[in-house]
Amino acid sequence: MKERLLVLAKAAPEASAKYQELVCVAGITENNEWRRIYPLPWNLFWKNSEKNFKKKTWIEYELENDKPSVHRPESRKIKFDSITPLKEASFAEIEKLLLEKNTCIEELEQKGPRVQSLGTITPTQIIDFKPVDNTHYQQLVTKKAQQDLFGKPAIGLEIPRYKYQYAFKDDNTGRTHECLCEDWEAAELYRKCEQYRKNGKYADENEVHEKVRNKMLNITKNNHVHFIIGSHYRFPTYIIIGVIYPRKTDLQPNSKTPQTKQ
């Protein structure tokens, strides 16, 4: 059975307990259903892979079956060799879909991840983007030092010492949420800034955090930013797995970007 998906979230690659680097992808199907396809191998997204695809792109793939793969109802396993990247969607098309499905953290928490584990919110106020310790850093560094049967590092990923979280409000109740941001774009930004530090371009970790913070706050300085929210696979907590925002050209008058609901 084939299915088409508008990709709205590509979470940062993570190392599993079996030393495999995996990626979680989520979006909305052509039938207007939330879908999470996981796990996908990290090497699928290498630049030389013909299966590589980006956010805001339609893809087609074959399902292993049409049953949830885990306790989260939107999750499916797919035959990742069957992935075919299709066309990029316009921001107007994407935002229209997201506004129709707009929710808030409280509604997701009330339902629980066994009922709805994916959703989209439009933050009413973004307060901060700040670093937090990667609680699994030392454990993963130890695993990375090990080797597989072929003498290669057991984990090929660079292990981030820090992760980041947004502090924001998503309704008028006044409650402030702090959610980890696992968007691949944010993780890659931190990796590049950290490499600049190692090469002497940035003075220290504080400058790295400042560069990352400024970039991730700057992209939210308009009324067209949306967070794709997903539940953690082990715990009933929600994290940001995708940040959807417009390019400058998307906000020009001829782009036909819909107005955000008030």
Image (spheres, rainbow, N blue to C red):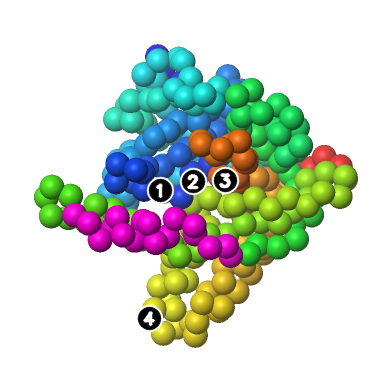
Q: Residues within 10 Å of mark 1 (few under 14, many from 20)?
A: many
Q: Earlier in the sequence, mark 4 or mark 3?
A: 4
Q: Mark 3 highlights which residue? A: 242
Q: Mark 2 highlights which residue? A: 11
**Residue 162 percent across, percent down from the top left:** 50, 64
**Residue 100 percent across, percent down from the top left:** 73, 30
Residue nearer the viewer, 138 or 24: 138
Quadrant of the image for the C terminus? top right
CB under 8 Å between callouts 1 and 2?
Answer: yes
Mark 4: amino acid: Asn
Quadrant of the image for the N terminus? top left
Secondary structure at badge 4 equals loop
Residue nearer the viewer, 11 or 237: 237
CB under 8 Å between callouts 2 and 4?
Answer: no
Residue name at image x 56 percent, y 38 percent: 235
Lateral position of residue 116 relative to residue 21, left or right? right
Give how far apart the Cα atoms at labels 2 and 4 are: 27 Å
**Residue 26 percent across, percent down from the top left:** 52, 35
Q: Residues within 10 Å of mark 3 (few under 14, many from 20)?
A: many
Mark 3: amino acid: Gly
Secondary structure at badge 3 equals strand
Residue name at image x 73 percent, y 39 percent: 105
Q: Earlier in the sequence, mark 2 or mark 4?
A: 2
CB under 8 Å between callouts 3 and 2?
Answer: yes
Residue range highlighted in magenta? 131-147
